[in-house]
Amino acid sequence: MKKFTAFIVTFLSSALMFAEEAASSGIISEKGLIALGASFSIGIAALGCGIGMGRAIASAIEGTARNPETGKRLFVLLILGLALIESLAIYALVVSFMLYFKL
């Protein structure tokens, strides 16, 4: 996990450095950076929500397998949790659209 985190930090910092360098030379415009930010925002939100939904479903299935009597209660809590996770993805989509239409 540490190697993955180090890779992501290195990747993002180098991308920011090159973007700053290109922006100062006039190659990249402000509109391009806004479009890039909009695409990254929805991509990262979708990745996070997908991972969260997968973990929630796996935990609910495991809990039901361990104690089948609580299956109905876990199902209600699972649907509530999935709805809240999905609302975060929709919120990120709205923010992405706001950035995109700022162009």
Image: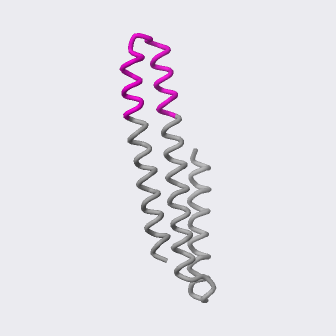
Q: Quadrant of residue 19?
A: bottom right
Quadrant where the N terminus sits is: top right
Residue 56 in the image: x percent, y percent? 47, 32
For the point 39% across and 35% down, which residue is it?
A: 81
Is the magenta region chiefly helix, strand or loop?
helix
Q: Is 100 on the left or on the right of 21, as rendered? A: left
Q: Is residue 29 above or below residue 1?
A: below
Q: Is residue 25 above or below residue 4?
A: below
For the point 47% across and 65% down, which residue is it?
A: 97
Q: Which residues are magenta?
A: 55-80
Residue 94 in the image: x percent, y percent? 43, 60
For the point 40% across and 47% down, which residue is it?
A: 87
Along the line of sight, which residue is nearer the eye, 36 or 14? Answer: 36
Magenta segment includes 67: yes
Q: Is 89 on the left or on the right of 27, as rendered? A: left
Q: Quadrant of residue 91?
A: bottom left
Q: Is residue 54 above or below residue 17?
A: above
For the point 62% across and 56% down, which residue is it?
A: 7
